[in-house]
Amino acid sequence: MLLCMFQLPRGREALAPETFRPWAALRTVVMAADTLWIAVLFALAVMQGATRSAFFSAAFFVVLFTACSVFYNRLAFTVSEAGLTVRTLAMERTVAFDDILRIDVLPGLLGTSYAVRTRLGSLTFSSLLAGHQRLCHLIVRKARLG
């Protein structure tokens, strides 16, 4: 019987889970933009003569970049012995590797998108995740797709 690189003989400890998150540089840039717009909003609030539309525009960008920052800091894909766990703002879901049917890799102008097709629906991630190619490779190996 051949053992896959990720399958361990009986009596040995399981491999540690591996987590993939958005690039640290991306998270840093989004937080910096959020900080900048908070400073602009504060400056407009204390400045005499700022228009209402300028104030609301700055508030919009504060909300936008705060939401993006929270989203990117929460997003994670974890490969473990239990399966693929996806954590977003609204949910945390683990899909067993036996339930993964295929992965569609879609190259594009702004990066690569990966659609993980499962019996329970589709999960997607992109090249915005650090180690996205390794994540795809681990899913293929653990789900025995290739």
Image (cartoon, rainbow, N blue to C red):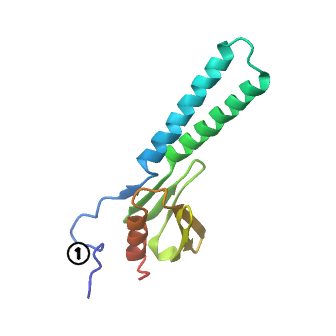
Where residue 75 sits: x, y (%)?
51, 50
Res 111 visible: yes
What SS does tag 1 mark? loop
The percent coordinates of residue 68 (x first, y second) are: 58, 43
Q: Amino acid at mark 1?
A: Pro
Q: Nearer the viewer, residue 30 or 94?
A: 30
Foreground of the two, 118 or 69: 69
Q: Which residue is mark 1?
A: 9
Q: Is 42 drawn above or below residue 29 in the view shown?
A: above
Is 58 or 77 nearer to us in this picture? 58
Q: Residue at x 59, y 26 (%)?
A: 38
Compared with 111, 48 (above or below) is above
> In screen coordinates, is 44 left or right of 135?
right
The answer to which of 131 and 13 lies nearer the viewer is 131
Tag count:
1
Q: Residue 59 lies in what quarter of the image?
A: top right
Residue 71, horizontal then vertical, whole percent: 56, 45
Residue 51 left/right relative to 115: right
Question: Which of the 4 image quarters holds residue 58?
Answer: top right
Q: Quadrant of residue 10?
A: bottom left
Q: Is residue 139 above or below residue 65?
A: below
Mark 1, Cα crowd under 10 Å, few <14 / some 14-19 / many 20+, is few
Residue found 68% across the figure and 17% down from its top: 45
